[in-house]
Structures are given as structure tokens and as C-alpha cells.
Image (cartoon, rainbow, N blue to C red):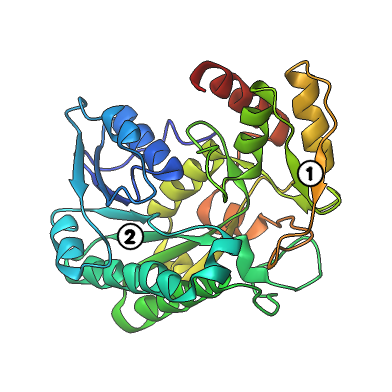
């Protein structure tokens, strides 16, 4: 179960791009905990120096300050690397609607640079972060790979394009690529600050500070909230997957469905706070309902997530109580 007993060849080296971010720092921590080498590449534009400082004294951790938009940086970072876990990207659907060119540069060009560098340096596996946003307006639940609708944001488009490049790099060049469509990841070290912060850490922080959170829309939108350790497991298991599974994209979630309004009241209860939320307008580009079928990842990657929402949210609340 999980990832802690997974085995890789001795002295395996993993390059984690965006390794100072929320998911990336959890990956670096897990890899070094398991006794393997983690190289973190991050320009600290959204990643945090604190996440680097947390691991910097570990002998099997290396930090490179650099930008995946620079191809030479990507080439140097891939030197001597066995596995690339490409997490570096700019998130947020609403922000991408405001800044489409910026997202093109960072998310598409950056990922292509990394794929090409990984190919040139003969990396064994290239695992990259995609997103549930690629399902767009397709109404059917649960979301199944191969049944995508019209895209609703530049962010979603960047992730779809990266998946197409992943397919091509496998077919044309034989680079084993695995796209992971993350569904609303949450957990320790997720940033609660900023206009585009994820909903769970933002709600927790505001409630702990005596503030009233605003729910966009009526709160009846649903999401497949996924604890970060499930995502760590998916990345590491993709590195051990058969080449026959390469060139594909996989849903990475728990397979559950939580409504925003229920999460809000659940957080209030867990924190022993009674406070009604504010309600605001729907966010442009947002999908109303999201819930994943994870059977493809189960079958081809051996993905078997340990953390359901209840287990994950209890751990997240505990972490924020001690770290905010």
C-alpha cells in the first residue's frame, strides 16, 4: 500500500521540477526519506524558499535555482538523472484567463523543454503533471480518460497540449511519458495565501483567523479532493510502470465526490467554529462537477490510493493548526 515500500535501483536520482512548490516539495521529501536522490529545480516564482530550507541539510537533496523556460538549464538539470517528475507549471484557471501568453510560455514551452532535455539525456521515465481541467465541459461523471469536452481556459489548454506532446515523445522518440491528471490536490504545505489560493487551505486559514470565507457560486459544486500522499504514490508508481503504459494520461484522485458547502461546514465542525460563509459569483472557466474514474491508473500503474477525503482532511487540518 502507498509508496513507502516501493523499490528503485540503488542510488536512483529523481529530478523534480517545481520541487519547491506544494506537490514538488512533498515528492522531494518522500524520495529522500526513501533513501534516493532528489534534485529540485525551481525558479521560486511560486515555489517557496522555506520548502527548500526544509530539506537542504539532507545529503541526498540538491537544489538548483533555475527556470524550465531556459533549455540549457533543463539539459544541465537532467544530467545523470534516472526519472523526471515534471511539476513545474503555473496553476489557476482564472489567472490563466487573464494571462494566456504567460501560461503558454511557462506551461507548454517549459514542459517541452523538459521533455526534450530528458530525451537527450536518456532519462528512463518522464512523469508530468496534467489536470482534471482537460475534461472541460464534458458533462458525464465520473470522468474517464478519452471522454473530454471543450476546454474552458488557457490553463486547461496548456495541460492538453502537454499531454499531446507526451504522446508524441513516446511514439516518435521512445521516451516513456506518463501524464497525471490531478484532481484538486490538498494537504500539508499547500499555500493558503493569494487571490488564487486553493479553497481548502484558504478556508482553514480564514476560519482560524476569525475571518469569513467566501464561496464562489452556491457551494453545490463538487470536486474529487485528493490528498497529496496519493499524488506522491502515483508519481512514484508511474516511474515503475511498464513501457506499455507509456504515452498515456491517467486520472489521479481518490474517486470520491465532495460538495464545497459540505466541506465548509465540515471544516467549521472540525475547528469547533460556528460561522456562516459569504457567497460570491461563480468563477469563470470553472467546471461545476468533477469526479474521477481511477480504474485505468489502478490497472496500468498499480495506483491504489490510501487516503480518502476524511483521512486526508484530518491530517491537513492538523498540519495547518501547527504551521499557520
Say which residue appears at 54% left-offset and 69% top-offset.
98
At label 1, counting other C-alpha atoms closer than 10 Å, the crowd grade (few under 14, some 14-19, many 20 or more) is: many
Percent x, y of residue 111: 35, 68
Looking at the image, the residue that sits furthest to the bottom is 172
Q: In which quarter of the image is residue 178?
A: bottom left
State how far apart marks 2 and 1 are (Cα).
Answer: 36 Å
Percent x, y of residue 263: 78, 36
Residue 125, numbered circle: 2
State how many labels appear.
Answer: 2
At label 2, counting other C-alpha atoms closer than 10 Å, the crowd grade (few under 14, some 14-19, many 20 or more) is: many
Give the SS element for disc 2. Answer: strand
Residue 87, numbered circle: none
Is 10 or 122 nearer to us in this picture? 122
From the viewer's perspective, is residue 245 above or below residue 109?
A: above
Say which residue appears at 27% left-offset and 60% top-offset.
124
From the viewer's perspective, is residue 6 above or below residue 294?
A: above
Say which residue appears at 70% left-offset and 28% top-offset.
211
From the viewer's perspective, is residue 62 above or below residue 311?
A: below
Q: Is residue 61 left or right of residue 95?
A: left
Q: Is residue 249 left or right of residue 280?
A: left
Where does label 1 land, which residue? Answer: 260
Percent x, y of residue 255: 71, 48
Say which residue appears at 25% left-offset and 73% top-offset.
116
Q: In which quarter of the image is residue 212?
A: top right
* Front: mark 2 or 1: 1
Q: In this view, does 56 lie to the left or right of 185?
A: left
Give the SS element for disc 1. Answer: helix
Percent x, y of residue 189: 47, 33
Amino acid at each position: 500500500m502507498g509508496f513507502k515500500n516501493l523499490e528503485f535501483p540503488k542510488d536512483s536520482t529523481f529530478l523534480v521540477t517545481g520541487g519547491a512548490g506544494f506537490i514538488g516539495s512533498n515528492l522531494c521529501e518522500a524520495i529522500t526519506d526513501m533513501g534516493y536522490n532528489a534534485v529540485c529545480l525551481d525558479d521560486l516564482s511560486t515555489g517557496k524558499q522555506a520548502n527548500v530550507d526544509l530539506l537542504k541539510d539532507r545529503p541526498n537533496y540538491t537544489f538548483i535555482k533555475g527556470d524550465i523556460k531556459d533549455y540549457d538549464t533543463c539539459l544541465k538539470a537532467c544530467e545523470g538523472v534516472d526519472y523526471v517528475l515534471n511539476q513545474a507549471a503555473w496553476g489557476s484557471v482564472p489567472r490563466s484567463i487573464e494571462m494566456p501568453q504567460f501560461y503558454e510560455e511557462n506551461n507548454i514551452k517549459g514542459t517541452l523543454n523538459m521533455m526534450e532535455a530528458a530525451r537527450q539525456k536518456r532519462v528512463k521515465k518522464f512523469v508530468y503533471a496534467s489536470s482534471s481541467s482537460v475534461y472541460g465541459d464534458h458533462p458525464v461523471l465520473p470522468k474517464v480518460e478519452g471522454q473530454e469536452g471543450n476546454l474552458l481556459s488557457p490553463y486547461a489548454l496548456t495541460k492538453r497540449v502537454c499531454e499531446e506532446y507526451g504522446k508524441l515523445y513516446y511514439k516518435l522518440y521512445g521516451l516513456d511519458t506518463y501524464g497525471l491528471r490531478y484532481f484538486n490536490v490538498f494537504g500539508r504545505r499547500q499555500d493558503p495565501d493569494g487571490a488564487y489560493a486553493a479553497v481548502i487551505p484558504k478556508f482553514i486559514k480564514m476560519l482560524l483567523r476569525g475571518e469569513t470565507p467566501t464561496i464562489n457560486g452556491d457551494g453545490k459544486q463538487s470536486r474529487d479532493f485528493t490528498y497529496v500522499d496519493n499524488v506522491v504514490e502515483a508519481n512514484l508508481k508511474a516511474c515503475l510502470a511498464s513501457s506499455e503504459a507509456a504515452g498515456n494520461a491517467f486520472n489521479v484522485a481518490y474517486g470520491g465526490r465532495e460538495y464545497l458547502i459540505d466541506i465548509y461546514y465540515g471544516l467549521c465542525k472540525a475547528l469547533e467554529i460556528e460561522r456562516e460563509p459569504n457567497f460570491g459569483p461563480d468563477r469563470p472557466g470553472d467546471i461545476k462537477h468533477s469526479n474521477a474514474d481511477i480504474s485505468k491508473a489502478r490497472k496500468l500503474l498499480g495506483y491504489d490510493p490510501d487516503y480518502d477525503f476524511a483521512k486526508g482532511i484530518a491530517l491537513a487540518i492538523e498540519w495547518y493548526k501547527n504551521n499557520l
